Each structure stands twice: as structure tokens, then as C-alpha cells.
Amino acid sequence: MWKSLTKSDNTEIVIALAGQPNCGKSTIFNAVAGFKVNTGNFSGTTVSYAETQVYIGGRTVRLIDLPGTYSISAIDVAERVARDYLLSGQVDVIINVVDASLLSRSLELTLQLMEMNVPMVIALNMIDDAQKKGMEIDIKALTSLTGLEAYPLIAVQGSGVHELFDAALRVSENGFRRVPPVYDRDVEECIARIEARYPSLLRERLKVDTRFVIIRLLEMDEEFERIVAEVDREFLEYVIENRRSLAEVHDWPESGVFASHRHALVLDLFEQVVSVKSRSGMGLSEKIDRFIINPVGGLAATVGVFFLMFAVSFWFGNLIAGLVEAPLESLGVFLMSHTSGYTAMLVSGVYDGFTAGVGIVLPYLVPLLVILSLLEDTGLLPRIAFMADGLLHRFGLHGKSVVPIIMGYGCNVPAIMAARNLEYERDRIITMLMVPFIACSARTVIILALAGKYLGAGYTTLIYLGNIAIALGVSSVLSRLSEDMSPGIIMDVPPLRKPYLHVVMRKVWVRIQEFLLFAWPVIAISSIALAVFSYVGIDEVINRVLSPITTFILDLPSELGITLFLGIFRKELTLIMLNSALNTADVSTVLSSVQLLVLVVFTALYIPCIATISTLWKEGGWKVALLSIALNTTIALVVAGSLAFLL
Amino acid sequence: MTLLELKEGDTAVISRVSGGKGISARMAGLGLHAGKKIRVVRAAPFRGPLLIEDISSGARAMIGRGIASHVEILDEKR
Ligand SMILES: Nc1nc2c(ncn2[C@@H]2O[C@H](COP(=O)(O)OP(=O)(O)OP(=O)(O)O)[C@@H](O)[C@H]2O)c(=O)[nH]1
Ligand SMILES: [Mg+2]
């Protein structure tokens, strides 16, 4: 059967990158689109789809990066995003990205995608890893058995990407020859029986291939069952009847009988396509891995990583902040002496914002981002999850929450989204509510720049440990409130990979750009706004409204009300506005050590920033967002208030 | 016998994955079907998960103990 596409040349071609988690889809996307989406050596880096328009061979292509999915029967929220997109009928060509070094597992999805009857090419990515394993893949045989063109790639080095996209375009223009997977005779007869009764109404309702729908039904796909039940109950009954007898004949559970047949096909295909020569000996990364998965090595690595993350950020941040302080100050003096009136107010606002970025935020932010990026790229995250799982069980969570939690140290927003990888709603909600307690980079800057500088390393460490303890306490209480039990962790552990400098640099640069483009203007505008506020006297109103909290509970100067208020928009603002709110160049002259501690602890815990709240809302609904606000604010008040009272 | 009863270094063949559709689907997604020969590489501390290696492909995955108790195996050899 030939499927030809009668698209005129000027229409956009939609190409979707689909594949199992961690096979390099986003790396291929970035190779074509420039660095736009995040990549990382763990399953579930991408949790929502991304698209970009590119021009390839004179054609306009809309390229889609999807979250990884192990199979079409998506289990978690991220997988559902991929499934929904693939089933939406918008895709002209699928690029099925596979990790060539895990070909047998990957082919399970490949066969499912083939059943969809959409033009497709195979990207055999990570061919370098496959070679290291001594695998030889007969691409010609793969093509003749599946009818799909396949191309070897090392996406992270950019090799093979051109050929792949040329092929994808060719397939979209010339059509492709369908070679659907053929199952055992009784399975095929079962499909044929059902196909003969396939209601035409259903054909109109569902935009996807008939055979594909039948197979989905045979696999007990609940969503398809629901739709079919709406259209034709009797037909569904008929399918179920056939499914049951198929399961009985083969003595398999109904839910797994079809998958087991597909699995047999995959094994067969794999045998015909792959031959394994001798493996090369244990490489360096395997030796490191052997060390890390030991209890002692793992603990050392985990503690070491956290220590590095904060110690390096603090040390490097202080160094750079110290270096730029004097030049920035003289720039300020120069600007102030050359402006007056409204211009002075404007200039001083912009100057404050600029200084805050260069002098305070960036010096601490950059090293933190580099280390977080290394954590993502090497594959340490799943290993930390492995080590921490048992411990997290005591607090009602399990190891899979490690990824969101550690990502939270960068920014809470992607961290909350990363909770999409958790299979169980209960785990997902608890993780989402826990993440806002994790001190993100903005709050880390505050902790390092205030506590680190004025209170010393001991207190700073205590603040971080206390912060983690509170986060764990919250999850422990929440999990006790929930009736459900979590079955626990199942998670892929990819090999350790060496980080590529260009990837780390691009990742860090993208995040700095976000800071420059979004945060910096907000900071500058807030600086100006604060100047205007104090000119008009609004700041005093805000300060007075908040004074029960600032002066009564926290024992802080009421002038801090406005800075805490602005912190809701961007957490950095609390720190940046501190000097001007207190009207000093050195806050330690105005605030006592206890007050500094109370301020830092309060900002580390109180109400999540606007971006975090809106993400919580989107991901978990308004109840989760409101609960998070209430939890964070209450705990911040209690903890910081007790510190103020007791010390 | 279940996966939970294996010690570090033991190999076995998975014979059945029970415990609901979600668990068996996840296991299958990671290539851990019935008939697969696996090895327990490591058991994490504090009753943490088991690190399992699929012997034929070398792929690794961690499986929590709760789920491991649903994975039936044929013990091979020590
Ligand atoms: N050795 C090797 N590593 C690669 C190759 N392509 C990508 N990687 C690395 O593999 C890891 C996973 O890549 P991603 O692009 O994030 O994978 P993905 O398919 O988007 O993953 P999910 O979004 O989690 O589904 C990253 O650390 C990449 O640097 C390759 O060809 N060879
Ligand atoms: Mg991705």
C-alpha cells in the first residue's frame, strides 16, 4: 500500500521526533534548531513538547520535540504528552529516534509507531555507544524488514543529522511503502475478524489508521475503549470477546497477550539485524560507575556534589562580586554626579538593576548553573536517586523525586514540571508541593550573599540542612495525609556519559539569557518603581500593611516589607532592594546577625514566586497552588518567627 | 521465588510480572519481559531499590523493593 502525500511545496511539513526516553531526541532537535530545549542524561528531561520552524532543502519544516515514551500506552503525564501529539493526526513524518545501543528495547516502540501508518524514518542514534558494546547493526536488513530508511547518528557531535533530515523530507514527498508488522496467524485472523466489523462511524471519528485502532483495543487501551464505547458498544464487546479468547488460547493475561506477540517479533527482528562482536573492556566511565553505585562511593559522590554546588558557587561568587564591586561603585558615583531630577531617578533605577545583575546575581548564578548542568549531563541524577530512594521512603517519597528536587536548586518552575515523570498522582502532588521549599538559584544567591557573607559557612550550611529537613518534613506529613500507597520506583539508569563542553556552555548560556532577558528588566523596572513608590509614599503603605509580619513576628525593620513584597515577583528582588530600602551600603550595620538569619530563613521559605505559583496551578490545579502558598507562608512564619523569638 | 530474594551478583530469568498493568507495562518498557535474563548488580542501602542489569543488552534499571516483590523469577545460579 502506497501512501502518497499530495501536499503542495509551500505547505509546512510537520516532523516529530519520537522515541523512548533518553535516546537523544532533544539533542537532534537542538542540532537542527540551535540550542533551544534542555537535554540531559536521564529519562524524562523533556516533559512537554517543543516546536520550532526550520528551513531544510528549501522546505519549511515544523520540527517537534516530544517527551520520551516507552510505549504508545503512555503511563505518566510526560508520556501522555507524546502520545496525544502523535495521535492528533498533525504529524506528516515521524523521526523515530532510537538508542542504537539499546536497540531491542527500542524496537518495541518502533513497531507500535509503524502500526500507526504514518511516514517514518529511523534515527539510529548513539551509534558510538553501540559500537563500544560491540554491536554491529545491519542497516540494510533493518530497512528491508521494516520498510523504513534508517540512518546512523552521533547526535551530540552533530554527525548524521543532515542525512537523516534529507531522508525525512524525501519520505514526506515520495510517500513510503507500508510494511506493517505481521503477527502470528491466529493474531492476524483475530485482527481480520475485527476489521471486517469495523464500524464506518468509528473510521470518521478517529483520524488514525484502522489496524492501529484495533491493535490498541487488543492492548486494552482505555482511551480508545472509551471512544469506541461511545460510538458502538456492540463492536467493543466483540473486540473484548476476541481479546479474551486470544488470551485464553495463549494462556496470557488479557492485558499482555498482544504485547507478548509484539515482543516476539521484536526479538526476531533484532536477531536478524544485530550481531554482537566482542565488547571492548571496561572503560573509565564504567569504573567510575562501579565506585558510585557502592554505598560508600555513592554517599561520597552525593555529599560531594552538594558541597561542590554551594561551596564553589559561594567561593566563586564572592571572588567575582568582590572584584566588580569597586568599578561598579565608581560608575554609580559618576552617573549620579552627571544626572539630576527625573533622569536621575530613571538612571539610578537602571543602574541598580545593572549592578544587581553583574555584581550580585550572576557571580553566584553562573557556577551553580555549571554544576547543575554537569549533574544533568553526566547521568549522576539517576544514581543519586538510587542512593537516596531508601532514605526518601521514610519521608513518604521515593527516589524518582530526586530529579525534581535537585532541579529545584536551579529553578522551581522546571522542577515542578519534571514531576510529570512520576507515574503516580500521589507522588506527583507531594513532590510538587515539596519543590517550592527547595532554595532555587535566586534564593541561593540570597543565602550565599547574606548568610554566607555575614554569618559564615557554619550558619549557611545549617540553613541548607534546615531547609532540606523542612522540605522532607513537609513531604512526610503530606504523605501521611494521603491514603494511597506508592508502589515505588522503576527507573532507567543510563550509562555515565562524559559531559560535552559545548553542551554545558550552551545550557548555561540559555539560562543566563533567560535571566538577562526576563529577570533583569523586572529588576530594573522594580528599582525604578521603588524609587517612584517612595517618592509617592506607596512603599510606606505596603510597609505598614506588612508590619505585623515584619516587625511583630519577625522582629525586622518595617522598611523590609516592600522588599519582601517585591520578592514575590522575583526572589532576587528582596536582596537587591535591601540596600535601598534600608538606605545603607552595608546591611550588617543596620541588621543584627539574628535579624539577618531571620530574614534569610524567611525568604528561603515564604510564598513561592509568581512563576512558581502559576506553574503549580497549571500542573496541579488551583488547590495545589493555594495549598502551596499556605504551606510555605505558614511554615516560613513559624520557623523564622520562632528564630526571632528564641534567639 | 521473587526478585526480592536475589542477592547482589545473582542471575535469574524473569518468569512473570504481576502487580497490575502499570507495573508490568513499566517493566516491559524497560525491556524487562518474561524470559529476560537479569543480574542483580547492587542493592541500594536503607532498603533502597535493586539495580538490575539486562544481561543481553547491558541496560540497567533500578526497581524498588515493593515492585521487585511482584517480579517472579526462575533462579539460575549463584
Ligand atoms: N554517546 C552519545 N551520547 C548522546 C548522543 N546523543 C545524545 N547524547 C546524550 O544523551 C543524553 C540524552 O539526550 P537527550 O537529547 O536529552 O535525550 P531525549 O531523547 O531528549 O531524552 P528525554 O527528553 O528524556 O526523552 C544527553 O546527555 C546527550 O548529551 C550520541 O549520539 N552519543
Ligand atoms: Mg528530550
Image (spheres, rainbow, N blue to C red):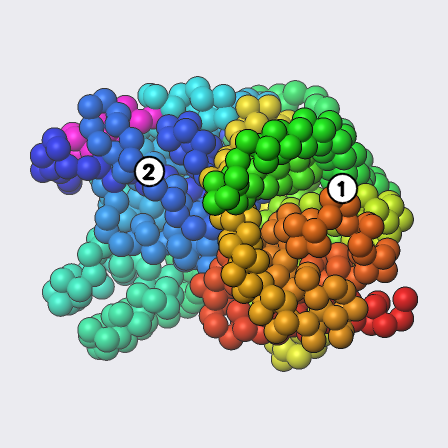
Q: Position of residue A11 (x, y in %)?
A: 15, 37
Q: Residues within 10 Å of mark 1 (few under 14, many from 20)?
A: many
The image quarter containing residue A124 is top left
Camera-side residue: A78 or A608?
A608
Distance between the Cα atoms at labels 1 and 2?
35 Å
Q: Quadrant of residue A285?
A: top right
Residue A448 colored in magenta in the image = no
Between A145 and A500, the one nearer to me in the picture: A500
Residue position for label 2: A52
Q: Residues within 10 Å of mark 2 (few under 14, many from 20)?
A: some
- Secondary structure under tag 1 reads helix
Per the rendered image, the range of residues in magenta is A164-177
Q: Chain of mark 2?
A: A
Q: Which mark is residue A435?
A: none
Identify the subunit bearing mark 1: A
- The residue depicted at 33 percent of the width and 59 percent of the height is A216
Are marks 1 and 2 in one subunit?
yes
Q: Nearer the viewer, residue A505 or A90?
A: A505
Quarter of the picture containing the N terminus of chain A is: top left
Residue A174 position in % (x across, y down):
16, 30
* Rendered residue at 89%/48% (across/down): A458
Identify the image quadrant of the C terminus of chain A: bottom right
Residue marked by disc 1: A310
Look at the picture and state if B63 lies above or below A26.
below
Q: Earlier in the sequence, mark 1 or mark 2?
A: 2
Residue A169 within the segment the image draws in magenta:
yes
Q: Tell me what residue is drawn at x 63 percent, y 23 percent.
A: A279
Query: Looking at the image, is B49 positioned above or below residue A286?
Result: below
User: Do we see residue A411 in this rendering?
Assistant: yes
Residue at the spot x=40%, y=34% of the render?
Answer: A29
